Amino acid sequence: MPGHRGLTRRAGALRSGPAILLTLALAGCMGSDGPGVAKSSMTPGGEIRRAGDDTQNRSAIIGELLSRKSILPSSGAYAEVAQAVIEANAAPARAELRVARLKAEARATNWLPSIRPSLSLTDLGETFASLLIEQVLFDGGGRKAERAFAAADVEVAATTLAQDFNQRVFEGLGHYIRAQRALEQASLANQAVGRMAEFERIVGIRLEGGMSDRSEQRIIQQKTSEMRAKANDDRFQAQQSIASLEAMASRPLSGLSGLQSLPADIGAAEPLAVLKARAEGSRSIAEADMAKSGYRPGLKAVANLNQDGDVESGLSVDFDNAIGLGTGAELEALAMTGELADRRIARASDEASRSLIALQHEITTLQARRAEGETVLAQTGATLDMFTEQYKVGRRSLLELVNMFESWSGMQREQASLKYEIALLQLQIARDRGVLVDGAAL
């Protein structure tokens, strides 16, 4: 065809000219250590914001992530733990987002002409240089789909980054809350051991006076040993949780204590799993569009500038994909990508909604149990006081008093645990909605 005939290269002696100079200049520009890239890759944090700023029209998903605010208190134990675990995060997801952002930046100008320098040695020992310039006039939407794919890839990486940081903060706060629960239960167990030691002293006096037998003493000693074992186990659990927290933190977190209240309504932020499903759906559709464009004819203008300053040009028509008997089925499968993406988004939304409803129902149940438990615990405490008075006047045996105390002590431990379980469930909801970390800070 005329275009191809015009692109035949001719050999000639090398002389200084625009072709060879441009060849060398372009080769230098293709290095990976340019100052702009190095500066971008060394900048910590704010990758989601930069990903939004790199696009002319910020995507809805990027905007949604940037608008998220952390529900954690701005100061106190929760803030200290969250900051410490974030600082120590190696954040491979942040690097993945940076890579996706740079790829999208590269694809943003794929509609511009491409220049391909060539430098070759002929059979006669002469060097020949030329520049091949290509401009796509029509490609069936392939390059537009490439840009859409790169943009969607940035959205997927951004939601992955948000999930990674929210999960890390959730794990850190989970270790902290479990440590606080174990420490409070250990304190309660120690108090119970002290009370049982007093009962053991009393039964020892009764045993010396012949008012009791050794079976009663053995029962009380056994119950005291069980409570002491609970206290030791609670301390071990606390130490283990604190060690796990400090292993993922950037600095020691000793001295922190207590729970902090979280907002009763953390808002209706769309769960991160649904956002990611939407981004992955957009990427799948763009990928299908790229594949479909390969079955359409592409038209490009080609110009060859040789070292003599001569320009040879032509037009080229080609297909990226061969057409065969299975082409129809392939195109039909690609056409169903949009429907498949919609179904995956719907499934992710349904699963997230059911999970959040179940978590909220469990919180409501625990809150009702806690309120009811306060009443029952107070009543049991009053009964214990009554048993103590009756024991003093001989109307109750020491074993009856010890059994009542053991029952009251167990209820006290369970009641103390409920508020920590509620706190963990609240954090789980906040993690799924992606509101444990400010989106703009990622």
Image: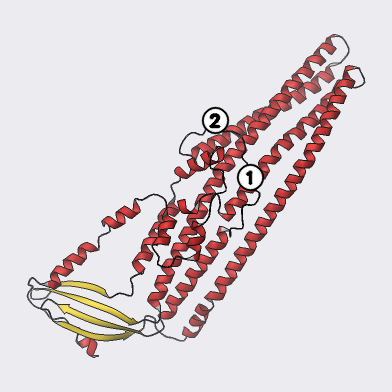
| Relative vertical location of residue 237 with respect to residue 14 in this rendering, above or below | above
Does the CB distance between marks 2 and 1 fall below 8 Å? no
Tell me the quadrant of the picture where the N terminus can be found.
Answer: bottom left
On the image, numbered disc 2 is attached to which residue?
Answer: 255
Position in image of residue 175 (x %, y %) = 58, 40
Type of amino acid at the residue the image marks with label 1: Leu
Q: Nearer the viewer, residue 39 or 116?
A: 39
Q: Is residue 88 visible?
A: no
- Find the distance from the CA under tag 2 to the CA under tag 1: 21 Å
| Relative vertical location of residue 276 with respect to residue 169 in this rendering, above or below | below
Number of residues whose C-alpha sits closer than 10 Å to that of mark 2, classed few (under 14), some (14–19) or many (20 or more): few
Position in image of residue 307 (x %, y %) = 12, 76
Q: Is residue 66 visible?
A: yes
Q: Nearer the viewer, residue 297 or 51?
A: 51
Label 2 SS: loop
Residue at image position (56%, 40%) is: 78
Numbered tag placed on residue 291 in the rendering: none
Residue at image position (32%, 86%) is: 317
Instruction: Identify the image quadrant of residue 210.
Output: top right
Position in image of residue 47 (x %, y %) = 42, 55
Asked if residue 233 lies left or right of residue 76, the reply is right
Residue at image position (63%, 45%) is: 424
Type of amino acid at the residue the image marks with label 2: Gly
Asked if residue 134 lies left or right of residue 262, the reply is left
Q: Nearer the viewer, residue 105 or 23?
A: 105
Marks counted in the figure total 2
Q: For the residues carrying marks 2 and 1, which lies nearer the camera in this image?
A: 2
| Relative vertical location of residue 28 with respect to residue 373 in this rendering, above or below | below
Label 1 SS: helix
Position in image of residue 167 (x %, y %) = 54, 50
Asked if residue 238 lies left or right of residue 248, the reply is right
On the image, numbered disc 1 is attached to which residue?
Answer: 424
